[in-house]
Amino acid sequence: MMGPLLVSIYVFVLAAFLGFELITKVPPTLHTPLMSGANALSGITVLGALSLVTVADPSVGVVLGTLALVLATINVVGGFLVTDRMLSRFGGGGDR
């Protein structure tokens, strides 16, 4: 019998393994589109963490939801800053 915590740990380990394999197999020229996709997934994580924090009992769920919210927000903001910096290199000086 698997509890919700065990299922969550199982999903986390699979996601970590998949993320590691994906990052190591993607060539560097495709990192920017991959980062944009990761930003979109982090936005979904932010929404899920917000819903978890608002409905969960004060327990491990709130702590994990808050941690997920903080880390996903850092990922989204950092990803957008890096993407903006990279796209500014192709802009031609900001005359447009």
Image (tube, rainbow, N blue to C red):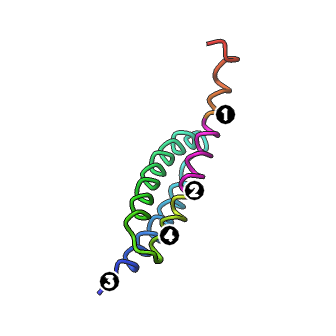
Residue at position x 44%, y 58% in the image:
50
Alpha carbon distance from label 2 to label 1: 23 Å
Q: Which mark is residue 85?
A: 1
- Say whether disc 3 or disc 1 marks the residue closer to the N-terminus: 3
Q: Position of residue 19 (x, y in %)?
A: 51, 59
Which of the two marks, 2 or 3, is nearer to us in this view?
3
The residue under label 2 is 24
For label 4, the residue is 64
3D distance between C-alphas at marks 4 and 2 = 27 Å
What amino acid type should be assigned to the residue bearing mark 1? Arg
Which region is colored magenta? Answer: 70-83
**Residue reaching furthest to the bottom:** 1
Q: Nearer the viewer, mark 2 or mark 1?
A: 1
Q: Position of residue 86 (x, y in %)?
A: 65, 33
Q: Horizontal and vertical percent for residue 42?
A: 48, 51
- Residue identified by numbered label 3: 2
